[in-house]
Image (cartoon, rainbow, N blue to C red):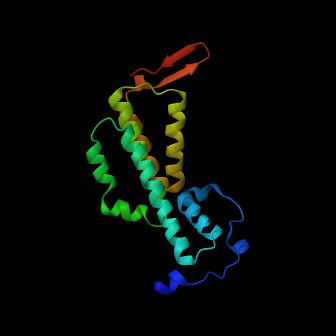
């Protein structure tokens, strides 16, 4: 490891930079930013990979802290679940779980908030839920079943705003 840390990088910057973007790269986006930063700083490969891991953990910490802020109840239990060794190990490695896990926590926290606060779901809230669920499905399709949690929200909380009219779904 000491040799890896000190080894002078001999790669060309143009060979290492990405050549395009695909929607599926969202799976590794936090790690990719760390790796790209390491490449731009012309660091040895060992430190480039470490930067990728650091950015993955940073993304996990930011998104899970937002999820904890959104939760109206059971914050300690939720935080303990986020801090289990398996979650931390997955979040600190360069894989799609570093994006998937915090987004699942965030989605679940939003659903719990809507259930507990009996808050109406309108326009922007629909978009937030769909965006997060879309990222989850893009990363790992079977996790799309989390959408079934939306059935736990009472129907009368779903509000559709039409021009000059506000429609509330009935139970």
Tally of numbered discs: 0
Percent x, y for residue 150?
A: 41, 36
State left or right for residue 149 relative to residue 164. Answer: left
User: Residue at position x 53%, y 16% from top?
Assistant: 166
Q: Is residue 75 visible?
A: yes
Name which residue lies at 26% across and 47% down.
Answer: 77
Q: Quadrant of residue 32?
A: bottom right
- In the figure, 51 relative to 103: above or below? below
Whether residue 96 can be seen here: no
Residue 55 x, y percent position in the rendering: 50, 60
Q: Residue furthest top?
A: 164
Return the x and y of residue 160 as percentages of the image width and height. 53, 23
Q: Is 41 on the left or on the right of 111, as rendered?
A: right
Work out whether 147 lies above or below 4: above
In-image side of 43 versus 159 (left or right)? right
Q: Position of residue 22 (x, y in %)?
A: 66, 58
Q: Look at 30% across and 59% down and name the residue there.
A: 84
Q: Residue at x 48, y 60 (%)?
A: 56
Q: Is residue 31 above or below residue 154?
A: below
Front-most of residues 97 and 75: 75
Report the front residue among 50 and 88. 50
Q: Quadrant of the C terminus?
A: top left
């Amino acid at each position: 490891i000491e040799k890896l840390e000190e080894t002078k990088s001999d790669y060309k910057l143009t060979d290492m930079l990405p050549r395009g973007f695909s929607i599926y790269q969202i799976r590794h986006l936090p790690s990719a930013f760390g790796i790209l930063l390491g490449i731009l700083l012309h660091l040895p490969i060992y430190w480039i990979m470490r930067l990728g891991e650091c950015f993955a953990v940073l993304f996990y910490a930011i998104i899970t802290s937002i999820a904890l802020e959104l939760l109206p109840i059971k914050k300690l239990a939720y935080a303990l679940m986020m801090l289990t060794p398996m979650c931390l190990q997955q979040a600190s490695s360069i894989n799609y779980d570093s994006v998937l896990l915090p987004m699942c926590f965030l989605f679940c926290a939003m659903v719990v908030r809507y259930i507990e606060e009996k808050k109406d779901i309108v326009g922007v809230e629909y978009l937030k839920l769909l965006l997060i669920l879309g990222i989850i499905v893009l990363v790992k399709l079977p996790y799309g079943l989390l959408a079934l949690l939306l059935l736990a929200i009472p129907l009368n909380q779903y509000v559709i705003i039409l021009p000059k009219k506000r429609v509330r779904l009935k139970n």
